[in-house]
Image (cartoon, rainbow, N blue to C red):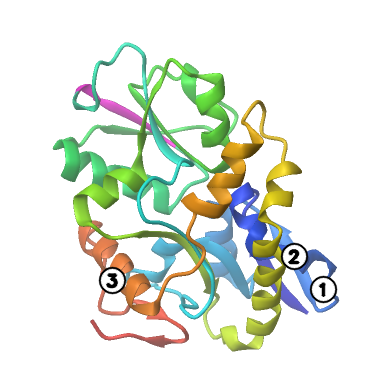
Amino acid sequence: MLRIGTVPYLVARPLTEGLDAEPSVQLSTAPPAELARRLSSGELDIALASSILALGEDALDFWSDGPVIACDGPIQSVLLFLSPRLQSPSEIQSLLLDPNSRTGRELARICLRDAFDLEPHAIEAPLEQDPFESGADAVQLIGDPALLATQTHPDWTTVDLGETWKKLTGLPFVFAGWICRTGFDPEEVAPILEKAAERGLSRRSELAQSTDLGNLPIEFLDNYLHETIHFRLSQEQIRGAIAEFGLRADLDIHRIRLESKSVAQ
């Protein structure tokens, strides 16, 4: 039985369509931070997980031939929300971090430091707390909660971290991809994952229509899945984007794990 993990967000659905019906697959859903833990412990074989897991001393294998969750400009679902009392990002002194996030929270730190010359005090948000009631100057959110918050908190100014990264580097940003536990060969599951992506990517309009995300227009969600999110990048684009991310995050990039071998930089 193949133990596969995914995130509970709309952005993942085009890549996981029908996996729950595969007889050889045990599919589980969890936020990125929990998927990271399960991969590290060996509870999952492969997961649609945070790209930051392919960096550092304990890097895991990133299946670079497979589909990804990326952007080449605005991402619309990895955001900083600025308190209404602030006039600009330069006033941020405290930042509440999304407890479910791994890559997004590091990207927030990088963007604030490199784009705005800021290193605000970081606050860990309790899972049960309403982040907008925390008193922090800014709130970092990912996924569907970020999409919904643009509707429920319109008085909070948003900073799109994908857009900020693009302006900083000129590069796309890879938020997630299929990442393996130590010792697992992604080729074992490649045909199943490619079939799921083929199904899901062809049904993006249907997925947008069947998603309950408050008052967000279907047209917005359809465009989000068709235009905003990039589900395919070349290996060179993936390697370049992740290497730049690693350098700016002060993580070891000499063992970036792509496919199932180390790729020299």
Q: Which mark is residue 22?
A: 1
Residue, x 63% and y 32% (percent of image)?
217
Residue nearer the viewer, 11 or 179? 11
Residue range of the region highlighted in magenta in the rendering: 91-97
Tell me the residue that label 3 is attached to: 240
The type of residue carrying mark 1 is Glu
Quadrant (top left, top right, bottom left, bottom right) of the N terminus? bottom right
Q: Position of residue 52 (x, y in %)?
A: 39, 62
The type of residue carrying mark 3 is Gly
Label 1 sits on a secondary structure element that is loop
Tell me which label, 1 or 3, sits earlier in the chain: 1
Tell me the residue that label 2 is attached to: 27
Label 3 sits on a secondary structure element that is helix
Q: Is residue 209 above or below residue 37?
A: above
Dots 1, 2 in contact, CB < 8 A: yes
Quadrant (top left, top right, bottom left, bottom right) of the C terminus? bottom left
